[in-house]
Image (cartoon, helix red, strand yellow):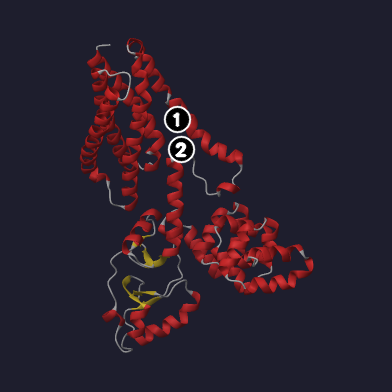
Amino acid sequence: MEKSFYEIVVECLRDVGSMNVLKEILNEASELELLDTLQKLSEEHQGMVYRLLAKDKALDVFEQLDTDFQQQLIRAFTDKAAIEIIEHLPPDDRVKLLDELPAKVAKKMLAALSPNERSMTNLLMGYEPDTAGRIMTPEYVNIQKGQTAAEALKRVKIDAPNKETIYTLYITDNTRKLEGVISLRDLLIADPNVKIEDIMEKITATVATNTDQEEVARILQKMDWLAIPVVDKENRLVGIITFDDIAQIIEDEATEDIEIMGALNPSETPYLKTGIFRQARNRIVWLMFLMLSATFTGLIIAGFEESLEAAIVLATFIPMLMGTAGNAGSQAATLVIRGMALGDIQFSDLLSVLWREIRISALCGIALAAANFIRIIFLTNVGDYLLALTVSLALIATVIMSKTVGCLLPLFAKKINVDPAVMATPLITTIVDAAALIIFFSFATLILNI
C-alpha cells in the first residue's frame, strides 16, 4: 500500500540523517499537502518542517494558515524570522495576526516593519474592529479615468506584482474619488486608444470604512463580486475587500451564532485545542442562567398545585406541551435570525413576519391538536373528551404563542443592538416553557373546573 505524504514526512522526521531528503520532498510538495501535514504534526515538528521550506513557499503556506496556527508558529521563530514573515503578509492578514498576538509582541513586530508596511498596517489598525476599514487591503489597482486603455494596461503591469488582486480595476479621478470599475478582461480586449471613462462601468455598490463586516459580507454575496471597494466619507477609494477574506468572516460569524444559539460563550479556538476548564467556563455561564431562570417554571407548577392534585393526569402532558413550545419557538427564531443575517428581514418587516407566523402557527397548532386529541381518546387509557379538548386547545394556543415569541424576540434584539442569536433556542425555550404552563393550567381551570 502506497504511503501518504504525511507518513513519508513522519518517517523522515524520525531519522535525523534524512533532513536533506525531507527538505527536498517538502519543497516539491503542493501547498495543500503541506497544509494538511502541518495540521497533523506535533507542535515541535510543525516548526521543524516549516523551517525546511524555501522562503517563497514558506510565505505562501503561512498565508493559508488560520490565525491560531500562525500564532503558534510565530512563537517558535526567532524575532528576525517572525518579522520577515509578518513583513511579507498582505496588510489585512497582517492586522488580523497582530490583533491576536499579545500586545507587547504585536507592538515590537509593528515597530520592526519597514516604514511603508508599518504605515499601511497602522492605517488599518486605526479603524474599529469588525469594520470594513479593519479588514480591507490597500493593495488594489486603480487607474485614472482620463487614461487610454493602453496606458491603463501599462499601469496594471507595473502595479500587479505588489497588489493582492488585479482582476477588478477601479477608476478614480485626480482626487482618488471613485468613478467606476472595469474588469481586466474588458481592458485587455478594448481598443488601445479608447478612453477608460468611455468603457468603464458605474459602481453599483460600495461600503464605508465603518460598515460592519457582516453587512460587507451580505453585500458582497448579493452582488456576486470578487471584491468590493471601500470608500471614505468623501467617496475616495481607500481599499478593497476580497471575497476570500469575506468567506472567513462568514464562517466565523456563523460559528459564533451557532455557539450562542447553543448556549455557549463564543470561542475562536478549535474544539480539540481548547482546554477543558476553558470549555467548562464557556458553558457554565449560560447553563447557570438557564437553570436559575427555570425556577419560574417550578414556581408556576407550585402555584397550580391544587389543580394537579385534583387531576393528577394533567402532569403527564406537561413534558409534551413544554417540548412542543420550545421546538415551535426555536423554529421561528432560527428562520427569522437566518433571514436577518441574509438581509431578507428588517425590523420594518415586523408586522409582516408576525402575521405570517400567526397563520403558520395556527395551521401547525390545529394539526398537532387534532393528532393529540385522537391519541388521548383512542390510544391512551384516559379516554376523557374534556381532558382531550383541554390539552388540544392548550396546544394550539401554545404553538401560536411560541412562534410569536420566537419571531419577535430576535427582531427586537436587533433593534436594541443585541445579537439576535442570544434570543435563540435556550432563552426562547425558557420563556415559552413558562408561558406554556400558564396557558395549560388556565385552560384546565376553565374547562375542567379544577
Mark 1 lies on a secondary structure that is helix
Q: Amino acid at mark 2?
A: Ala
Which mark identifies residue 290? 1
What amino acid is at disc 1?
Answer: Leu
**Can you say which quadrant of the picture contains the N terminus?**
bottom right
Q: Residue 133: percent from the left, percent from the top?
A: 42, 59
Question: How busy is the neighbourhood of tag 1: few (under 14 within 10 Å), some, or many (20 plus)?
Answer: some
Q: Is residue 421 visible?
A: yes
Of marks 2 and 1, which one's residue comes earlier in the chain? 2
Q: Which of 352/107 is in front?
A: 352
Give the percent coordinates (x, y) of residue 170: 36, 73
Which residue lies at the image location 34% right of the left edge and 23% below the top edge?
317
Residue 173 in view of the camera: no
Residue 191 lies, with reference to residue 164, above or below; the image says below
Q: Quadrant of residue 94?
A: bottom right
Above/below status of 325 relative to 184? above
Element type at mark 2: loop
Q: Position of residue 192 (x, y in %)?
A: 33, 89
State how far apart marks 2 and 1 are (Cα): 9 Å
Give the percent coordinates (x, y) of residue 258: 44, 45
Q: Indicate the quadrant containing the C terminus: top left, top right, bottom left or bottom right.
A: top left
Residue at (37, 18) in percent of width and height = 301
List the residue tagged with mark 2: 263
Q: Are marks 2 and 1 in contact (CB under 8 Å)?
A: yes
**Relative to 92, is 364 on the left or the right?**
left
Q: Residue at x 28, y 74 (%)?
A: 201
Closer to us: 372 or 78: 372
> In the picture provided, is 284 more to the left or to the right than 151?
right
In the image, taking residue 219 as reference, residue 157 lies left or right, namely right
